[in-house]
């Protein structure tokens, strides 16, 4: 990675949006009939790794949203019901 403008800087994991952009590029390359069988497998492997990485990011983001949503329904420490601020 690092050759394309949609790839993350070295040492940094791609964000969800970057991952989707790269997956779009991978799909386009796989549809290219000019790739050799070896190149096709290599690109496919990269895509599958990226899919797994992106799914983990989406799951983690969902858990964060769930935690924030649950925290938003809990009273703040020190706040009592009926106390108006």
Image (cartoon, helix red, strand yellow):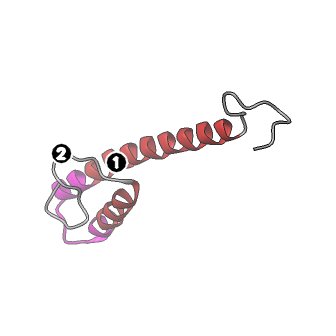
Taking depth in this image into account, of 69 and 45 the one nearest to the observer is: 69
Q: Secondary structure at mark 2?
A: loop
Q: Give the residue at x 33% y 49%.
A: 50
Q: Residues within 10 Å of mark 1 (few under 14, many from 20)?
A: few
- Where does the image place residue 65, in percent across and percent down from the top left? 58, 44
Q: Quadrant of residue 76?
A: top right
- Left or right position of 18 against 64: left
Choose between 77 and 83: the one closer to the eye.
Answer: 83
Q: Which residue is mark 2?
A: 11
Residue 23 among those drawn in magenta: no
Q: Secondary structure at mark 1?
A: helix
Q: Which residue is mark 1?
A: 48
Which quarter shows the N terminus?
A: bottom left
The quadrant of the picture occupied by the C terminus is top right
Question: With respect to residue 82, does 12 lie above or below?
Answer: below
Image spot of residue 4 (x, y percent): 18, 65
Q: Residue at x 53, y 40 (%)?
A: 64
Q: Which residues are magenta?
A: 28-43
Q: Is residue 41 magenta?
A: yes
Depth order, front residue of 61/72: 72
Q: Position of residue 59 (x, y in %)?
A: 50, 41
Residue furthest to the top: 78
């Amino acid at each position: 990675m690092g050759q394309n403008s949609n790839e993350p800087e070295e040492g940094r994991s791609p964000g969800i949006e970057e991952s989707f952009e790269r997956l779009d590029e991978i799909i386009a390359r796989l549809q290219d009939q000019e790739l050799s069988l070896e190149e096709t497998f290599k690109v496919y492997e990269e895509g599958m790794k990226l899919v797994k990485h992106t799914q983990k990011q989406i799951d983690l983001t969902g858990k964060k949203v769930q935690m924030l949503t649950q925290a938003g329904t809990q009273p703040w420490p020190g706040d009592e019901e009926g106390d108006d601020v």
